[in-house]
Each structure stands twice: as C-alpha cells, then as structure tokens.
Amino acid sequence: MKKRITFGAVFGLLVLASCGPTRFVEPLAEDEFSLGGSFGGPLIDYAGVPIPVPLSQIELGYGLRDDLTLHGGIHATSALFGNLQLDAGATYQVFDTKKIDIRGSVSPSINLIVDFNDRKTKVWPILDFNFFWNYGKRRNYIYLGGNFMFDFEGITNPNSERIGYTLFSPMLGHTLKGKERSWEFFTEIKIIAPYMNSETPFVPYTGITGRRGGTGIYIGFRKILSKK
C-alpha cells in the first residue's frame, strides 16, 4: 500500500508540472509576436463522470527567426491556490520535407513552481518534440509528438531513498489558422504517463487508459501580431 500511495503522489505531482498543452509546434515567422491562452487539463472522475480539470494559462511568443520562436507562459489557475507557476522556452524547427509538407520541431523549456504557502520552489526541465503536416490554403496543421518532463530531485521513497523520475506523454493535436494567419485556434489531447499507476488517494485521475496514467484535453487561442 505504501508503494502505491508513493507512486500516486509522484504521478499527481508530475501531472501538475506537465498539465499544459504544447506551447508552439510551428515556429512564428521572424519578428512576429503572439498573445494567447489555453484552457483544460487532465481528466478526473467527478461523481462517475470524466471531466477535465479547469486549468488556464496565458502565453507569449516571439519569432526570433523563421525557424526559432521564444515563448513563455503563466499558469493563471495555479495563482488561485497560492502558487506562482511559470514556464519559458524555445521552439526550433529541425527539418522540413517540402515535397510532402511534413516538418519537425523540438521545444526545450523550464517549468517553475513557487509555493508561497510552504515556501518551496520546484523546477522541471521539459522537452517536447513534434511532427506536423500542413494542409489547405491557410496551411492548418495536424501534429503528433511527445513530451518529456524530468524530475531530477524526485521524492523520498519508503526506504528513505531519493528517486528521480522522467515522465513521458505522447500527444496529438490540430491547429486551425485564420486568414493570413491572423489568429490560431488549437486543440490537443495528451496521454500523460500511460505506463504509470495513477491510483492515488489525492486526485482521481482517469482517461482512455483507465488507471494507467491520465488523459489531458486542451483548447487554446492565440492572436498573431507582426512587426513587418
């Protein structure tokens, strides 16, 4: 029982850090600036009905080059519970197969949480990778990828040993673009750590993989501004 509770606590903690969608999959053009937000989170069992945790985030993005975007975000819902949660990173396009319009990007970032109640700070390195396919006149795209979140500090197990964890979560999403890419609307589903036991006395996570991992559902919108 102790082992199950321990792994449940780990899973609940790591879900908190990886509870947002991918910041950027396709980089912005050079000198483009964006402002947006997202809503949604992992599904929980609420009176027998699976509903997403209502988490919200605000994001900023800036196209440093056509293949490199800097971005950051603040997790607004966390602030309501006495936590300051921020993330910052970059998205870099690593390849482009122009004949079939499939491209790939990687997005290293840092997620930081400051708990003002317990006066503790936690930092997680994160790495996203995505393959995306553009289609149509507005070059909407579908993407498929994965999210790695590294907890080097870890937690103390029942044997008083400090154990670190790596959380892997595959994801699938779609981005719909406005005329001349004036805005973007995106949806994403993330299968959070499908190999981990999510049974926990604290948060009843659920999803399409049952009690193995969790399922996150997100929607978001960003307004694209250009300096050109």
Image (cartoon, rainbow, N blue to C red):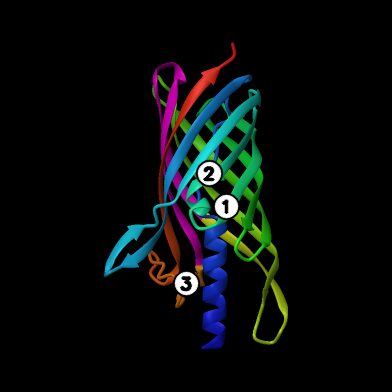
- At mark 1, the secondary structure is strand
First in sequence, mark 1 or 2: give its number.
2
Mark 3 lies on residue? 198
Residue 200, relative to residue 184: is it above or below?
A: below
Spatial separation of the CA atoms under disc 1 and disc 2: 8 Å
* Range shown magenta: 170-194
Mark 1 lies on residue? 147
Write the residue at 53% across / 27% down: 34
Spatial separation of the CA atoms under disc 2 and disc 3: 22 Å
Residue 27, relative to residue 138: is it above or below?
A: below
Residue 145, relative to residue 98: is it above or below?
A: below
Foreground label between 1 and 2: 2
Write the residue at 31% across / 62% down: 50
First in sequence, mark 2 or 3: give its number.
2
Residue 128 in magenta stretch: no
Q: Position of residue 183 (x, y in %)?
A: 43, 25
Q: Position of residue 76 (x, y in %)?
A: 50, 46
Q: Amino acid at mark 2?
A: Thr
Q: Amino acid at mark 1?
A: Asn
- At mark 3, the secondary structure is loop
Q: Which mark is residue 163?
A: none
Q: Position of residue 173 (x, y in %)?
A: 43, 43
Depth check, front residue: 90 or 39: 39
First in sequence, mark 3 or 1: give its number.
1
Disc 2 crowd, CA 10 A, few/some/many (<14, 14-19, 20+): many
Write the residue at 52% across / 82% down: 4
Q: Which mark is residue 22?
A: 2
